[in-house]
């Protein structure tokens, strides 16, 4: 939410958190958890998951929606540009 409020993006910190969560839960469960908790912020998280190559093509059994196709989630272009420099 810090990025949304004032544009402050700590990309390395976010990457580290996602790596730790991925090591604990695995990519499919991690993406499901992130989608359930941060549905409105997935367009900011998706570039990090793509960079780490852990974004599945679809997220299964998510609340009322049975299947979420991840290619339908938008991507924030500023974050993509920042991650290209990492």
Image (cartoon, grey):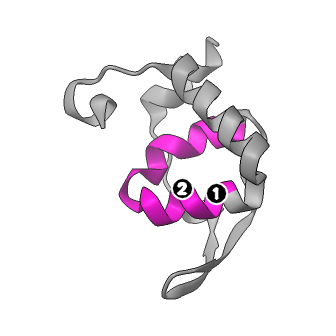
Q: Which mark is residue 31?
A: 1
10 horizontally vs 20: left or right = left
Q: Position of residue 82 (x, y in %)?
A: 52, 19
Q: Identify the residue at horizontal 54%, vertical 55% (top origin).
A: 34
Q: Is residue 31 left or right of residue 75?
A: right
For the point 49% across and 53% down, the residue is 74
Q: Residue at x 70, y 34 (%)?
A: 19
Majority SS type along the magenta span: helix
How many C-alpha atoms fall within 10 Å of the one at disc 2: few (<14), some, or many (≥20)? some
Q: Secondary structure at mark 1?
A: helix
Question: Is residue 84 inside the magenta stretch?
Answer: no
- Give me the disc on residue 34: 2
Q: Position of residue 76 (x, y in %)?
A: 45, 39
Span colored in magenta:
30-50
Residues at marks 2 and 1, CA–CA distance in whole angstroms? 5 Å
Q: Is residue 4 above or below residue 30?
A: above
Pinpoint residue 73: horizontal percent, then vertical percent: 52, 59
For the residues bearing labels 2 and 1, Cβ distance under 8 angstroms: yes
* Left or right of 8, for residue 42: right
Q: Is residue 54 visible?
A: no
């Amino acid at each position: 939410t810090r990025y949304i409020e004032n544009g402050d993006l700590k990309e390395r910190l976010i990457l580290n958190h996602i790596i730790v969560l991925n090591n604990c839960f695995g990519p499919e469960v991690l993406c499901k958890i992130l989608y359930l908790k941060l549905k409105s912020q997935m367009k900011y998280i998706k570039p990090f998951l793509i960079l780490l190559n852990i974004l599945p093509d679809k997220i299964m059994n998510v609340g009322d929606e049975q299947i979420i196709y991840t290619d339908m989630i938008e991507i924030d272009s500023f974050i993509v540009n920042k991650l290209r420099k990492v």
